[in-house]
Image (spheres, grey):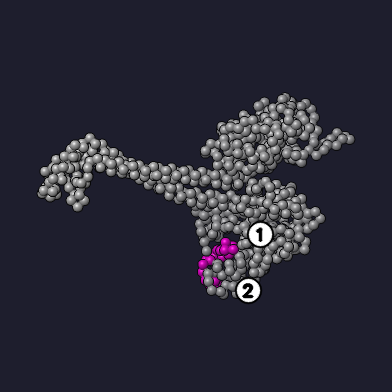
């Protein structure tokens, strides 16, 4: 039973995820989004991860940017109505089935969210009485009906936990006919990868008859229990075939499978991370390869057709050349042709065809059955019917030339069409690849905030609201980093990761734009604003005695260093990171250097949502043929999130894209970036 590429989670996978997701107890559901191709994403706080649920496929934590933003479909609106702001009070597995359940309290009510990853599975929101309030798909099956208003019933015939299987049960199963692995998969309802692993761990060849391993039943039961216990420890393993393609992901070390099939595997620290990587990234790579393979096959067909069309055109053009040469020869030697014809007609009438050659000038051959003479004129052989006049031959040749010219025109049009199809295919593949890479790009931690990277690689992050301002200072500000704030109420706090160094004036001014542009100065239509900066050691959350500091507010002590007249002109562009598009902002010159295409914005009147859509069109129109698929893969929501508010576009152009948009002086991970 060779390993097949895993397309959905198993009961062991769900058990592992359920155990891991117990850490979500107490978390709140901030929002819910739909996923491209189906499924849902639950945005949670305070955990810095989201829960992805794709019925019939997977459920786990994700760090990939996979949600569809914009106006949500009715089902998502229904889920938001009941669950947004709700607290997760419990997470578990239904029996040992491929069903995960979240228990949520929201608005004084209690709900259960069932995520079924079995075939034809659904996501169902159920109230305290067990009535289905929302469901991803209506299902009418022989053993249950899943629809709004019905009572939720899980599928019958629950799979038994490995800890509940006795030796007698397994011994009885192994008395059946067939290969051991198939008998156990069928009898226990366990996935083939688990059964094979268990058999291989106890030294049993999976393909041998089941009856021959009955005496090993106790060992096999113990192996199942060991695999189950391993699955609850939280680690994940991605298994790769000999070509480097990911074929499965499991919550236990697949040492038996790897040994038997000569496979490699990689361990990840959490099973959600492994599932996330496998389903979002690795399978997308497989899809990309399959897409590339299909495109290459189609490309070869098109290239073959193009080559054949070109050869056909060459042959037709050669025929044209020959006809035109014959026409020229006939025209220049028409007198000799008349002499040859008159002679041939007379000799044929008096003596027969056999006497023409050698008697008549210029005639080198005859074809009596076709009535043809072969006449040598000007070094060329010309065929003419003995009853035809030379001018008739010229008319016939001219007609044939016209017919071939028409074929050439049709051939050229067909060739142009084929070449257009080839170009469209290559652009389609590029666009789909860019979209796939954009979908699986793992966002950096700082992308939750306003952010930019200065010319010399200093990272600057700023809060999007009072809560994030509080978080930015508490989590990332220390005495070696710089605190920035626009000299106006309602500006984001920006932390510049200077790491104890004095940044150049250019970098300070670049970072200052982050707090200036996203402040109320932009919304009120100012053209510039002053920004001050201090070292982290000058900032405190403690208010003076008898005073109170609002959320997101801080006390600043000592001298403030001012950057005067920070101009409110924001560059917004699309750069490339790991072959995927990323929206960057900053001073126009900085963005121009790093982006494929960019726009310059100033305070204005256009609504951010409408402007984001228009900007995407404008940027795509400015993109080169090579970069257009990348720009097309940019989400409108990603552009909207980087807009300071209502704005006006004053310039759109191509960038220089010579520098990466990430920190090049200091590279921070989630933990390394903390204060």
The kind of secondary structure element at disc 2 is helix
Q: Residue 212: within the magenta?
A: yes
> Residue 554: x percent and y percent?
79, 35
Q: CA distance from mark 2 to mark 1?
A: 40 Å
Q: Residue at x 64, y 42 (%)?
A: 636
Report the residue marked by disc 2. 168
Judged from the image, the secondary structure of the residue bearing numbered disc 1 is loop
Question: Measuring 59% from the left and 54% from the top, which residue is drawn there?
Answer: 237
User: In this view of the protein, can residue 474 be seen by the observer?
Assistant: no
Residue 71, image x, y percentages: 68, 47
Q: Residue at x 75, y 53 (%)?
A: 81
The residue range painted magenta reads 191-215
Q: Residues within 10 Å of mark 1 (few under 14, many from 20)?
A: some
Observer-nearest of 523 and 514: 523
For residue 137, the mark is 1
Is residue 205 shown above or below 425? below
């Amino acid at each position: 039973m060779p390993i097949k590429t895993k397309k959905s989670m198993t009961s062991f996978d769900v058990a592992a995820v359920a155990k891991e997701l117990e850490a979500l107890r107490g978390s709140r559901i901030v929002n819910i989004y739909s996923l491209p191709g189906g499924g849902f994403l639950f945005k949670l706080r305070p955990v810095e991860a989201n829960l992805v649920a794709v019925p019939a496929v997977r459920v786990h934590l994700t760090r990939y940017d996979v949600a569809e933003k914009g106006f949500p479909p009715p089902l998502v609106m229904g889920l938001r109505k009941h669950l947004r702001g709700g607290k997760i009070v419990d997470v578990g597995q239904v029996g040992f089935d491929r069903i995960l359940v979240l228990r949520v309290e929201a608005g004084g009510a209690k709900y259960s969210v069932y995520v079924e990853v079995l075939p034809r599975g659904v996501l169902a929101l159920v109230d305290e009485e067990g009535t289905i309030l929302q469901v991803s798909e209506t299902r009418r099956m022989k053993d249950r009906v899943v629809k709004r208003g019905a009572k939720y019933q899980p599928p019958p015939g629950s799979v038994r936990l490995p800890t509940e299987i006795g030796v007698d049960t397994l011994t009885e199963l192994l008395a059946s006919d067939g290969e051991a692995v198939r008998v156990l998969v069928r009898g226990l309802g366990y996935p083939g990868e688990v059964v094979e692993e268990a058999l291989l761990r106890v030294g049993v060849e999976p393909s041998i008859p089941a009856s021959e391993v009955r005496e090993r039943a106790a060992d096999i039961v113990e192996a199942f229990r060991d695999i189950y216990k391993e699955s609850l420890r939280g680690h994940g393993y991605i298994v790769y075939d000999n070509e480097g393609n990911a074929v499965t992901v499991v919550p236990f070390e697949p040492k038996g499978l790897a040994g038997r099939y000569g496979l490699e595997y990689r361990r990840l620290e959490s099973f959600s991370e492994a599932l996330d990587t496998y389903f979002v990234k690795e399978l997308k790579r497989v899809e990309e390869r399959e897409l590339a393979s299909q495109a290459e096959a189609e490309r070869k067909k098109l290239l073959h057709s193009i080559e054949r069309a070109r050869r056909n055109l060459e042959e037709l053009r050669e025929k044209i050349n020959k006809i035109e040469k014959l026409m020229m020869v006939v025209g220049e030697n028409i007198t000799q042709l008349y002499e040859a014809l008159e002679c041939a007609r007379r000799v044929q009438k008096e003596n027969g065809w056999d006497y023409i050659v050698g008697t008549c000038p210029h005639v080198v051959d005859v074809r009596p059955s076709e009535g043809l003479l072969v006449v040598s004129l000007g070094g060329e052989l010309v065929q003419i019917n003995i009853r035809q006049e030379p001018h008739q031959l010229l008319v016939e040749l001219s007609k044939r030339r016209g017919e071939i010219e028409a074929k050439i025109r049709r051939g050229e049009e067909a060739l142009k069409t084929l070449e257009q199809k080839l170009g469209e295919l290559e652009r389609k593949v590029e666009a789909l690849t860019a979209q796939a890479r954009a979908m699986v790009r793992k966002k950096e931690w700082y992308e939750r905030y306003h952010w930019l990277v200065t010319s010399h690689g200093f990272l600057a992050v700023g809060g999007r609201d009072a809560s994030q301002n509080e978080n930015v200072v508490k989590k990332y500000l220390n005495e070696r980093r710089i605190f920035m704030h626009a000299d106006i109420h309602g500006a984001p706090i920006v932390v510049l990761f200077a790491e104890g160094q004095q940044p150049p004036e250019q970098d300070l001014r670049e970072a200052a734009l982050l707090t200036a542009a996203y402040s109320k100065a932009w919304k009120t239509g100012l053209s510039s604003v002053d920004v001050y900066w201090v070292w982290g050691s000058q900032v405190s959350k403690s208010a003076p005695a008898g005073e109170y500091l609002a959320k997101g507010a801080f006390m600043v002590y000592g001298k403030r260093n001012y950057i005067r007249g920070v101009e409110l002109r924001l560059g917004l562009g699309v750069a490339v990171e790991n072959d995927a598009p990323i929206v960057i902002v900053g001073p126009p010159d900085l963005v121009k250097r790093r982006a494929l295409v960019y726009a310059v914005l100033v305070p204005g009147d256009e609504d951010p949502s409408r402007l984001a859509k228009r900007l995407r069109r404008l940027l795509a129109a400015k993109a080169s043929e090579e970069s257009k698929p990348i720009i097309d893969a940019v989400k409108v929501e990603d552009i909207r999130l980087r807009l300071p508010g209502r704005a006006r576009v004053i310039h759109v152009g191509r960038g220089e894209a010579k520098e990466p948009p990430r920190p090049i002086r200091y590279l921070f991970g989630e933990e390394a970036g903390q204060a």
